[in-house]
Amino acid sequence: EKEPVTVLVTGAAGQIGYAIVPMIARGAMLGADQPVILHMLDIEPAAEALKGVRMELIDAAFPLLKGVVATTDAVEACTGVNIAVMVGGFPRKEGMERKDVMSKNVSIYKAQASALEKHAASDCKVLVVANPANTNALILKEFAPSIPEKNITCLTRLDHNRALGQISERINVYVSDVKNVIIWGNHSSTQYPDVNHATVKTCSGDKPVRELIADDQWLNNEFITTVQQRGAAIIKARKLSSALSAASAACDHVRDWVLGTPKGTWVSMGVYSDGSYGIQPGLIYSFPVNCEKGNWSIVQGLKIDEFSRKKMDATATELMEEKSLAYSCLN
Ligand code: NAX
């Protein structure tokens, strides 16, 4: 049997936390043959609820689950962690200024960066889910300089999966036959869902989405806004934000990162920009990536038309603004 891998989930008493911990304990994140130890962190007001989650994990008797720590102590939570899924954060409440929410999250991510840097495994992989996800990840990166920047990512896989889902619904094909959509940029409503390189598997080989859906009007407008606004549509319908789809996407993100993407398939991940596609270094930006042996690399050489260029730059501009807002909160 393999040695257990220790997975941290912060904000574990919240909605996404409740959905993701059983997925991890069943092997949806690291594989059906990979034992896991779960570390769950939340804050004092949620401590009782967190204990309840721990009780349910014990009661589920998951064969792969080799230990559960439920704590409000960041040091205990981060110790020996191999994979950190950062779901905990300060939500935007009605009437709150953007700067106030940013300021709360900057201080959370600054503190947790230090705890991870000091106590996690030296090759710990980090996935930030909590919003503003790209900027929280950037703050974490800045304040954990000894964690390799390649190990710090944020979640845009939910947006990627939403794009796959919209294509599959529109032309009535299995979602598993659609691939290579791209989410560029920020996990926000300025993200750019791009289908220019996406294909669908058919009985006569892979066909471009743009060939199967000849309706450019739909692809360039409604498709994009539906994906951008999907989070708000879920809140409207459920009176709660996305949780099961977010948890599932976080598992997909880590699984593909650790175990690799299938040949010829890429996924979207928020990663530290190296200047690819003219996106300036110093931002955590969502790119198409291939993963192999635990490393991601940005897919190179895709042709970018003028329509895409504008949308890719607009979301980069928003990320620069978020970055300066975050830095202004540090002073
Ligand atoms: P909840 O409010 O249900 O849960 C958040 C949990 O975090 C709470 O239990 C809270 O006590 C805890 N928390 C707060 N501060 C903490 C700290 N300093 N350390 C540890 N835990 C802390 O929110 P939920 O619906 O689970 O969403 C969690 C986060 O994911 C939010 O920031 C949300 O905006 C973000 N999302 C990001 C998505 C993405 O694709 N990147 C999609 C889904 C989701 O909206």
Image (cartoon, grey):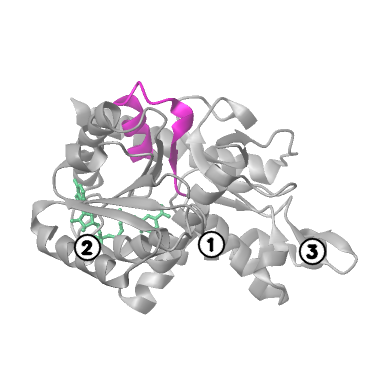
Checking the image for residue 227, the label placed there is 1
SS assignment at label 2:
helix
Q: Is residue 85 left or right of residue 310?
A: left
Image position, residue 106 (x, y; %): 24, 37
Checking the image for residue 71, the label placed there is none
The question of residue 33 being in magenta is answered with no
Q: Quadrant of residue 3?
A: top left
Q: Which residue is mark 2?
A: 54
> Which region is colored magenta?
135-155
**Crowd around label 3: few <14 · some 14–19 · many ≥20 (10 Å):** some
The alpha-carbon separation of the residues under discs 1 and 3 comes to 22 Å
In the rendered structure, which disc, 3 or 2, sits on the residue that comes first in sequence?
A: 2
Image position, residue 187 (x, y; %): 45, 49
Image position, residue 137 (x, y; %): 37, 37
Residue shown at 39% from the left, 64% from the top? 63
Residue shown at 64% from the left, 47% from the top? 261
Which residue is nearer to you in this view: 113 or 62? 62
